[in-house]
Amino acid sequence: MKYSQLFGKTVRDFPKEEVSVNAKFLIRAGFIDKLMAGSFTLLPLGFRVKEKIEQIVREEMNATGANEMLMPLLHPKEIWNETGRWDSAKEVMYQFKKDNKEYALSFTHEEIVLDVLRKKISGYKDLPVKIYHFSTKFRDEPRAKSGILRGREFLMKDLYSAHTSNEDFDKYYWEVADAYLKIFKRLGIDVRIVEAAGGVFTDDHTHEFQVLCDQGEDTIFYCDCGKTCDCKFAENKEIATVKEGDKCPKCNDCKIKEGKSIEVGNIFKFGTVYSQKMGVYYNDKDGSRKLVHFGSYGIGITRMIGTLVELFHDDKGILWPKAVAPYQVHLIEIGKDASSIYEKLQEEEIEVLYDERDVSVGQKFTDADLIGVPVRLVVSTKNEDKIEWKERTSEKTELLDFEEVLKRLKESK
């Protein structure tokens, strides 16, 4: 992509009304545009990051045997009444009336999945079912103040599973937990599985995937194991049975620490509660009618974009992990045409953002740092036939032949 043709350029100043790091950098670097509090447009750069996050999630969900689908965002009141959540979840749900009928905008899809299940399954041979989608969610968020981390409209991946027994469900529940750990590792972040309350989703305890971050809005208590053990104890402050400085109740050795964190995923055990309310049964081998065991599993896609910026930035701009960077290379020309290098890189299927604008060198370098592509290449009259290589996370520059540049880029894919 030629930078001159890219829609959504960088802007000179940080948005004055924004306080969160993710909003400041994503808006200024041209990844998102703010429509109103809690509502953002993903511009082309942001959309590319979103697509890469989605693909990583998709690959790991498919590896668990799940099927991708897509469900509606507009829901009738009647289906939410079946579980009682039309009233119990009204504080987070956008509800409205049209032509004397009442509707809601989706903040989750448990009821919709269960409605599909009761239409499509009959016997034990139809189970387990593992289905997921990427969809927009709407929540009446009173504190939409943390940029793309806390939106009123946002993108999520929802996975839902239905099983013949609690044993089969529990096995898959932890298989998904392992898949989540793989996803977050591929995204370059270290998460902790944290026990938490279920909120409007369930009365039972759930498990959140939290990443420690000073800018996070959650607080967790966790075992400060270091290298002494691998107990991985962690609780959300809302249900905590420990406090900072306590001895870990799991390993009975390490001390409990308190830290701010960002929730990037969660998994829920519903058992047969919702299935019973909505009449979702299957016929077992002996012909008996039994309730399905049901659970859901979420990852915030747009929230992940904001989380990565909160975790990976410096005073100059964003430091995208290679796996989700909008481009692999930011190619800059200074006084010398670099179009042939651009074309050669494209022929080798290297993703390139090519800054061929007639602007100052300082502006090009500033924009490159702000956007945060992992590798900057400079073609200039000063460097003659060599190409300057600089990684975004380093101050070191090197002069390389094109063949060496290409080799390094392919090795780092």
Image: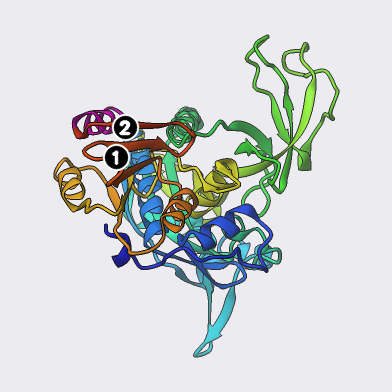
Q: Quadrant of the N terminus?
A: bottom left
Q: Position of residue 231 (x, y in %)?
A: 65, 17
Magenta-span inclusion, residue 4: no
Q: Residue furthest bottom?
A: 99
Q: Secondary structure at mark 2?
A: strand
10 Å neighbourhood of mark 1: few (<14), some, or many (≥20)?
some
Magenta-span inclusion, residue 408: yes
For the point 49% across and 30% down, which residue is it? 181
Drawn side of residue 1 relative to residue 72, left or right: left
Residue 118 placement: quadrant:
bottom left
Q: Position of residue 363 (x, y in %)?
A: 45, 58
Q: Residue furthest front?
A: 382
**Disc 1 and disc 2: Cα gap in Å?**
8 Å
Which stretch did the figure color magenta? 403-413
**Disc 2 marks which residue?**
399
**Disc 1 marks which residue?**
383
